[in-house]
Image (spheres, rainbow, N blue to C red):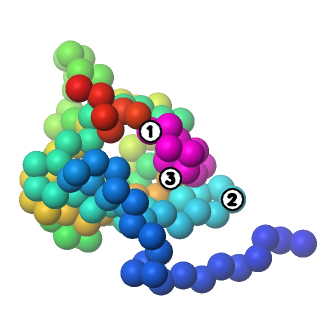
Amino acid sequence: MSSPVRHARWDDMPREKVTDAISRRLFTGERMMLAHVYLDRGAIVPTHAHENEQLTYILGGALRFWIGAEGDADREEIVVREGEVLHIPSNVPHKAEALEDTLDVDVFSPPRQDWLDGTDTYFHEK
C-alpha cells in the first residue's frame, strides 16, 4: 500500500524563522521536499553544499548565486529572477544573496534532513 495522499494550503503551514532575514515553509514527501523560502533584500545564504539535488524557482524578486567553492577560479555568478529556474546538482557548493525581497520555491530530492531536524547551522556561520 502506498503512502497516504496529503493536501495543504501554504498560508496554513507554519512559517519557520531561519534568520532575521530568512524564513520558510516546508512540505515534504518520502523522496522530495518543496519549500517556500522568503528572503529580505540583502539576506545571505552562506556557501554550503548538500547531497540533495536542488531546483530553485523564483516567484518574486531575484537571487544572486555563486556556484562553486569560495576561491575557486571557475566559481560562477548567476542572477536568477522572477519566472526563472536554477538547477543545482548534488554536492555543488553554492551561496546566494537576495537582490530584493524574494519568494522562491525550492525543490529538494531527497528531502533536506538538516532542515527538518534543525541542524542547518551554515545559516549562522560568519
Element class at badge 1: loop
* Left or right, 93 with reference to 42: right
Q: Earlier in the sequence, mark 1 or mark 3?
A: 3
Element class at badge 2: loop
Q: Residue at x 10, y 49 (%)?
A: 42
Residue at numbered disc 1: 120
Decide which of 4, 51 is in the foreground and name it: 4
Q: Earlier in the sequence, mark 2 or mark 3?
A: 2
Can residue 30 be found in the magenta stretch? Answer: no
- Type of residue at label 3? Phe
Residue at numbered disc 2: 30
Q: Which mark is residue 94?
A: none
State the extent of the magenta-drawn residues as a range. Answer: 110-120
How packed mark 3 is, by other alpha carbons closer than 10 Å (few <14, some 14-19, many 20 or more), is: many
- Type of residue at label 2? Glu
Residue 94 shows in the view: no
Decide which of 24, 75 is in the foreground and name it: 24
Residue at numbered disc 3: 108
Question: Residue 111, position in %: x, y?
Answer: 57, 51
